[in-house]
Amino acid sequence: MATDVHRPVTPTVTQAVRVEGLSRTFDGRAVIDDLRLDIAPGEFVALLGRSGCGKSTLLRILAGLDRDIKGTALVPRRRAVAFQAPRLMPWKKVWRNVLLGLPGKPERARAERTLDEVGLGHRAGAWPKTLSGGEAQRASLARALVREPDLLLLDEPFGALDALTRIKAQHLVAEVWQRRGCAVLLVTHDVEEAVLLADRVLVMDDGRIAHEQHVGLDRPRDITDPRFAELRAGLLRRLGVDTA
Ligand SMILES: Nc1ncnc2c1ncn2[C@@H]1O[C@H](COP(=O)(O)OP(=O)(O)OP(=O)(O)O)[C@@H](O)[C@H]1O
């Protein structure tokens, strides 16, 4: 199910993502340096790391938006990305935004079905400027989901939301992921969000995956569980934040 961003389909690959020996250099500086990463089909992986360590660069490569790489990056053909900024076209109604870039005649019913899935069906005919921040972010998620992705790439999708809206959006993503069964790679700065949502949390440093933490807690996760706090503290230490 995986395709190279350069080469044709490799049907024998059983991973949703297979990255090996990946490097990306900007102005002679290796931002990604011999990175290795596997993501299983249906796995939810969160990616943490200090600002500027290369998380978004990695995500852009996996999305196929940056092909100036060395090494191998095998990803499913069906992949979709949502960014921190919803990036909706103001001159197109919400449902048309959802279908943007899809081939064929725009089918409103298809957009509405996906908008329903993120609780936004009633705003299908609205203009983007009339949406709240949380609604715009849900529309952006619908635009990714309508592509029926095997891999959903999320670059800090909740970063700009207020605390309550953020919690709701996190629950929505957990729900959608469980229903859809696609693999997810979520870039986030929020350690608690990573432990709340992911099967596995990765910490990026020096252009590589420097640490990986499996989160073996039952879902839905209980943030008051002492094991939750322990995982969170361990990851914060890895990021150089001492909570003791
Ligand atoms: N197009 C580009 N040209 C030059 N340098 C770039 C380019 N894109 C990214 N970089 C540099 O690569 C490094 C990694 O950037 P990236 O955006 O991937 O970091 P990040 O981990 O996502 O950061 P943040 O958490 O702050 O979003 C940074 O030093 C950035 O300045």
Image (tube, rainbow, N blue to C red):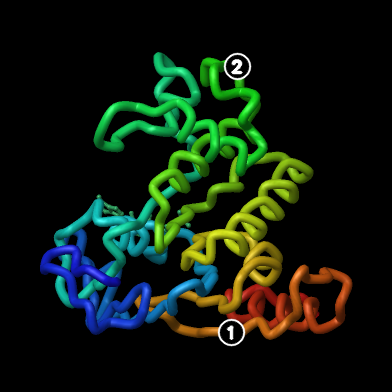
- 59 to the left or right of 130: left
Rendered location of residue 227, percent (x, y)? 80, 83
- 191 to the left or right of 157: right
The residue singled out by tag 1 in the image is 213
Residue type of the residue flagged with mark 2: Thr
Rendered location of residue 32, percent (x, y)? 29, 71
The residue singled out by tag 2 in the image is 130
Residue type of the residue flagged with mark 1: Gln
Element on which disc 2 rests = helix
- Mark 2 crowdedness (10 Å alpha carbons): few <14, some 14-19, many ≥20: few
Residue 52, located in which quarter of the rendered image? bottom left
Residue at the (41%, 62%) spot, across then down = 151
Which numbered disc, 2 or 1, marks the residue closer to the eye?
2
- Which quarter holds ligand 1? bottom left
Residue at the (60%, 16%) spot, across then down = 130
Comes first in the chain, label 2 or label 1: 2
Image quadrant holding the C terminus, namely: bottom right
